[in-house]
Image (tube, rainbow, N blue to C red):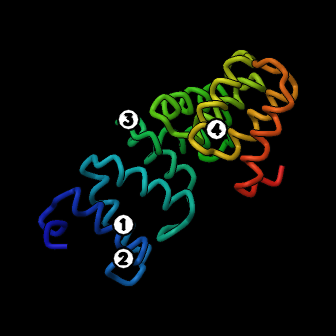
Amino acid sequence: RKAAEQGSARAQFNLGVCYEHGKGVAQDYGQAVEWYRKAAGQGHANAQCNLGLCYYNGKGVAQDYGQAVEWYRKAAEQGSARAQFNLGVCYERGEGVDKDYRQAAAWYRKAAEQGVARAESNLGICYALGRGVAQDYVCAAEWFRKAAEQGNARGEFNLGICYALGRGVAQDYGQAVEWYRKAADQGDAD
């Protein structure tokens, strides 16, 4: 708090995290937003991303997808993989921006290239369905594998589909079962 009150963006961000999660202080989303906003205003990418999440989820502020996108974009342009993924989700769903699969795939790629498993899985879906990119089952399977190897249940499930149908990989029911089982063990109902 002392450092935050002296203007340290890192301390302001950390204090926001404390308030958001109730660590050392009573949980208070309004206070979290206030501290995130101070750090975000100084260009702190993680604070910008977290402020975007607050707007996206309506925690501490009124839900506002447009504001969420604005803060995600600031953080994403600084290289925040979480913000890049979140921005991809907004473009895919048309939340706060017009639905644009090309933009969704581009932001997923940026996050996926930084190793974000959910982005890898979502980029695989883009390739499997030809959303925002040319349909390419080989690329889809490669991205699903990257996600699956990090333990991402949707990546495991989708890689199982690739093996079951022989899409992007040689058909192999044994491999399909193995990947389905891994996803199932994590509670993936599909």
Residue 23, which numbered label? Answer: 2
- Residue 68 is tagged as none
Pick the residue in front: 51 or 130.
130
Type of amino acid under label 4: Ala
The structure residue drawn at horizontal position 36% and vertical position 76%, both measured from the top left corner, is 23
Residue at the (34%, 67%) spot, across then down: 16
Specify which label sits upstream in the sequence, 1 or 4: 1
* Disc on the earlier residue, 2 or 3: 2
Q: How far is disc 1 from disc 2 in space, using C-alphas?
A: 8 Å
Q: Earlier in the sequence, mark 1 or mark 2?
A: 1
**Residue with the mark numbered 4:** 148
**Mark closer to the chain start, 2 or 4:** 2
Q: Quadrant of residue 91?
A: top right
Question: Residue 17 bears which disc, if any?
Answer: 1
Disc 3 marks a residue whose amino acid type is: Gly
Give the residue number, with chain letter if any, for mark 3. 79
Q: Residues within 10 Å of mark 2 (few under 14, many from 20)?
A: few
The answer to whether mark 1 and mark 2 are in CB contact below 8 A is yes
Find residue 41 and report its horizontal and vertical position in percent: 28, 52
How far, Cα to Cα, is label 1 from label 3? Answer: 20 Å
Give the farthest residue toward the bottom: 26
Whether the residues at callouts 1 and 4 have beta carbons within 8 Å, the answer is no
Kindly report which numbered mark, 1 or 2, lies closer to the viewer in this rendering.
2
Disc 1, disc 3: CB below 8 Å?
no
At horizontal 56% and vertical 41% (from top left) the residue drawn is 150
What SS does tag 1 mark?
helix
Between tags 1 and 4, which lies in front?
4
Q: Alpha-carbon distance for marks 2 and 4?
A: 32 Å
Please state which of residues 163 and 3 is positioned toward the viewer in this rendering: 163
